[in-house]
Image: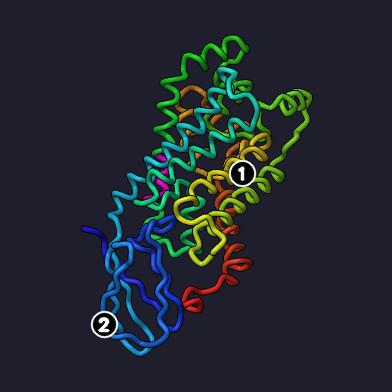
């Protein structure tokens, strides 16, 4: 039995319903245009989704009551979806760094993109597949996502990311140890940031030779300001595209079946561009879940608080993506969403 949510809507506006409360990428997202007061009744989704009950309480207001998946089911879905994302995405980084495979940023970026796509297809019908605290917060600000669910979603995302990091370490621990031995790296020392980067993220990307050579000469190629700007802009572009691809009014969008693929393609492009700079976080769960594991697995202070200190780590890989997600959602609503035609007008 689902949770009943009551939403107060002005009948003079177009009421945007989230069928089953699934939010982002829900398979049955509908808009109900109400131009005049209605009597009590039931409106059924053409796809056979749960009924939506309409009840006017005066001449201008009605209430929408709809079934939502239990929060527990959504939490499990977010955990599983984030696990898929991190297992494949960070797994690609493990292969590239410790084994020398997947040479070239584009190959690693492509794996990240496909990981996002698979995760959305796998769990999107249950939780909306946010799999990213920045998207969850953005959807809360601009997409009508319930605030009460935010802490549970973020906790589930961090849990999924942490568990994926655990599994990757079980698989690659021998390879990592041998790589560190051959490279003269002592885990937990400053030079181990190269292997720590398989879990958390650092700027400049320590696996890029130019950055490493510059750092050895005391040159900071990507400072905190540049890193924060990169993460804010990158996550804003991601959120902007997520809102654009999932806006039902946008007739130029790829539609519900293909939206996951194009969201994944957006991540691929962003990782290809920003990965060599900040490792392209775009997702606090992607960073802090594996980073916490790395701190426990021997990297210690190199993982947390990080070689640049806790303020830098939190600013670049937590605050910047969250701010970017919110700004990206706002930019879509103001610049594009406000100009999208209402379905009621087309009808």
Judge depth for marks 1 and 2 and give the one in front. Answer: 2
Q: Name the magenta segment's main secondary structure.
A: helix
The magenta region covers 152-159
Q: Can you give x and y, in whole percent of width and height, for residue 112 in the image? A: 54, 36
Spatial separation of the CA atoms under disc 1 and disc 2 = 51 Å
Q: Residues within 10 Å of mark 1 (few under 14, many from 20)?
A: many
Q: Quadrant of residue 265?
A: top right
Residue found 47% across the figure and 35% down from its top = 86
Give me the disc on residue 316: 1
| Secondary structure found at label 1 | helix
> Horizontal and vertical percent for residue 210?
75, 27
Nearer to us in this view, 332 or 304: 332
Query: Where in the figure is residue 73, as x and y percent of width and height?
Result: 29, 49
Callout 2: SS? loop
Pick the residue in front: 234 or 181.
234
Q: Are marks 1 and 2 in contact (CB under 8 Å)?
A: no
Quarter of the image with the N terminus in it: bottom left
Circle on res. 338: none
Let me know if residue 153 is in the magenta part.
Answer: yes
Residue 224: quarter of image: top right
Question: Badge 2 is on which residue?
Answer: 40
Q: How many marks?
A: 2
| Residue sitting at the far left | 1
Residue 85 as seen in the image, left or right of residue 22? right
The residue under the point 59% across, 40% down is 268
In the image, 161: left or right of 45? right
């Amino acid at each position: 039995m689902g949770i009943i949510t009551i939403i107060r809507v002005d009948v003079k506006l177009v009421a945007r319903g989230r069928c089953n409360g699934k939010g982002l990428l829900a398979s049955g997202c509908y808009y109900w245009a109400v131009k005049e007061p209605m009597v009590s009744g039931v409106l059924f989704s053409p796809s056979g989704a749960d009924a939506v009950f309409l009840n006017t309480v005066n001449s201008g207001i009605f209430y929408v009551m709809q079934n939502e998946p239990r929060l527990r089911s959504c939490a499990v879905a977010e955990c599983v979806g984030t696990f898929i994302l991190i297992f494949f995405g960070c797994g690609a980084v493990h292969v590239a760094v410790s084994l020398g495979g997947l040479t070239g940023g584009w190959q690693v970026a492509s794996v990240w993109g496909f990981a996002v796509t698979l995760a959305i297809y796998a769990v999107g019908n249950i939780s909306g597949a946010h799999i990213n605290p920045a998207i969850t917060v953005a959807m809360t600000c601009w997409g009508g996502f319930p605030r009460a669910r935010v802490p549970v979603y973020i906790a589930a995302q961090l849990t999924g990311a942490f568990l994926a990091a655990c599994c990757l370490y079980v698989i690659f621990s021998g390879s990592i140890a041998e790589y560190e031995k051959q490279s003269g790296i002592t885990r937990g020392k400053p030079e181990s940031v190269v292997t720590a980067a398989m879990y958390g993220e650092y700027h400049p990307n320590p696996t890029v030779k130019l950055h490493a050579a510059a750092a050895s000469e005391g040159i900071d190629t990507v400072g905190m300001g540049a890193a924060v700007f990169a993460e804010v802009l990158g996550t804003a572009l991601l959120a902007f595209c997520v809102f654009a691809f999932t806006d039902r009014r946008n007739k130029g969008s790829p539609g519900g079946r293909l939206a996951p693929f194009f969201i994944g393609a957006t991540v691929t492009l962003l990782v290809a561009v920003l990965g060599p700079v900040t490792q392209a976080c775009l997702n606090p769960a992607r960073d802090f879940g594996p980073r916490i594991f790395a701190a426990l697995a021997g990297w210690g202070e190199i993982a947390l608080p990080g070689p640049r200190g806790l303020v830098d780590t939190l600013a670049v890989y937590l605050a910047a993506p969250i701010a970017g997600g919110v700004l990206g959602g706002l930019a879509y609503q103001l610049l594009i969403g406000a100009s999208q035609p209402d379905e009621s007008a087309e009808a």
